[in-house]
Image: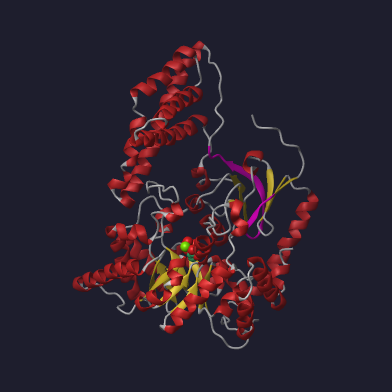
Amino acid sequence: MQEREPAGERTFRGIALAGGVAHARVLRISQGAPEIPQHTLDESQTEAELERFQAALVATRHQIQEVQRRVTAAMGAQEAGIFEAHLLVLEDVALLSQVKALIRDQHRNAEFAFHQVVNRYASALDAAEDEYLRERAADLRDVSSRVLNQLLGLSSESELSRLREPVVVVAHDITPSMTAMIDRTKVLGFATDVGGKTSHTAIMARKLRIPAVAGLGDASRRVQTGDYALVDGHGGVLVVHPTDATLFQYGQIRERHAALEQRLADLRDQAAVTLDGTRLILASNIEEPADVAAVRASGSEGVGLFRTEFLWLNHAEAPDEEQQYQAYRTVVTACAPAPVVIRTLDLGGDKAFPGLPVDANPFLGWRAIRISLSRPDLFRTQLRAILRASAHGCAKLMYPMISSVEELLAANRLLESCRNELRAEGIAFDPTMEVGAMIEIPSAALIAGALAPHVQFFSLGTNDLTQYTLAVDRMNERVAHLHAPTHPAVLRLIQMTVAAARERGAWVGVCGEMAGDPAALPLLVGLGVDELSATPAVIPAAKFLLRRMRTSEARELAERALKMASADEIQKLSQEFARSIAPELFDAAS
Ligand code: PEP
Ligand code: MG
């Protein structure tokens, strides 16, 4: 049973993911293990209960078949094979007849009967010697939670796309694919029990300008659908049933932000140049063609990171070559003559695609370039689409998660063979299109000198570079305070990358969240990067700061930072530097 919460204002403190303040009724999305009701039926109710159970099985079958269809289209029939096992569970005569017997003979409700039988089966399979049988326990649990959701009528993630009223979504977790479903006009804010600042959900929230907080402990169990709540995405706070005084206080923060945004908007057409004349490229990170309008409005110069995997996450079916080509071409044409850096598929990690094997350590597993190189059919389709789009403006191609020279060479070989294919077919592309590698794994930074001859640019993915250097899961709120891109080890890897690139004539960008964080940005300028790419929402503030900065001072700052040992001290040093030249950026939120 859920405990009754006291009436009146309640505050949950967590991690600020995306700035802004939102106030609306709560929609609580149910996830994880639901509470299973248990009751005894009247004799007269058992037939109807059996029918209800049967209807839940049919609805679950349709749901699984739909997922299976999506995965087959995206990854091929082999990857979708797992769902055959799931469908078989729904036909297991022995299991189903035991459930039905409990309903018919012992007058149990369907949820309780099903849950009890499934648990018995799953425990027996868990204990089996045979690995194949143990894996069937996972299948069984997966299907069982779908059936239980049907029976319990729990609101599921799919509700996010058909909301009628504005809401603040409260959930245990929100995945990037759920974020992709969100109707921005209805979801005013969101709050989760778990999650970190550089998770892809947080990144999406910043892009969508949805105030968001994470790391709220058990908030999702202590808040009810229909409660009023306020999300403070600056301070990382969820306030349930806020008082008038609290609403007034946050109203003032909102006004200060609106005034600052107005002021920053005036910089839209100004160059990203420091006071002592260093011209930087300030570009946008995007996830789909619809984001292009925001790129223009933000005053950024093209796209420094197009996360193409969202074309997979956002749509029912994986895009084929033509659909990908259209998507890439739209962005490249709209941004021309400014460049568009198109990153090849980075599925895996927290961007799970239904049907992709879920590794025990997804961030260390089958992700990004590793998937592309082991599935050349998928990879070639994407490479051809990007090459074709390059004929329409200034496209650049970038590989994610490069960890070795071999991977880079293998990717480049496939790219070259796609170029040859297109030439033979008489299809236009830009033969001079630049190719780059993301530097987001420490090994890549350490061998940047060996990678540089095979690319024209590097882009530092500081979200992953920090995660992998410090062994800190970027998704985990319990270690979020340790995910510090200002750690001297991360700064040294950035310094090494820039030095190796300079020596070999390659340019260097940064497309991790650090690039759009005013408190950390001066360090990147001081370390000598050429380009900063961030979500369009933060570009105006970054430009404001850059235009008040001296590169010579930023360089001194970076030199001092590299002599320090503590991430916190470096963060403080950089933030004080930024605050001293642009206090407005820091004062509006307090
Ligand atoms: C990064 O890791 O910093 C990056 C930009 O890539 P992503 O956030 O998509 O993993
Ligand atoms: Mg990354």
Residue at image position (54%, 16%) is: 40
Which of 510/541 is in front? Answer: 510
In the image, residue 221 sits, relative to residue 23, either above or below, namely above
> 435 left or right of 202?
left
> 581 left or right of 108?
right
Residue at image position (41%, 30%) is: 127
Magenta stretch bounds: 13-32
Q: Quadrant of residue 561?
A: bottom right
Magenta residue check for 128: no
How many dots with numbers? 0
Name the dominant secondary structure of the magenta segment. Answer: strand
- Residue 472 picture location, percent across and down: 54, 57
Extreme residue toward the bottom, this view: 276
- Residue 56 picture location, percent across and down: 43, 29
Which of 115/50 is in front? Answer: 115
Q: Is residue 283 visible?
A: no
- Residue 134 picture location, percent across and down: 38, 34
Extreme residue toward the left, this view: 424
In the image, residue 336 sits, relative to residue 294, either above or below, namely below
Magenta residue check for 31: yes
Q: What's the colour scheme? A: secondary structure
In the image, residue 491 sits, relative to residue 277, either above or below, namely above
Which of 185/473 is in front? Answer: 473
In the image, residue 398 sits, relative to residue 550, either above or below, namely above
Residue at image position (43%, 55%) is: 364
- Residue 436 picture location, percent across and down: 39, 73
Q: Is residue 15 visible?
A: yes
Which of 588/378 is in front? Answer: 378
Q: Where's the C terminus, which quadrant?
A: bottom right
Q: Quadrant of residue 260?
A: bottom right
Residue at image position (68%, 66%) is: 258
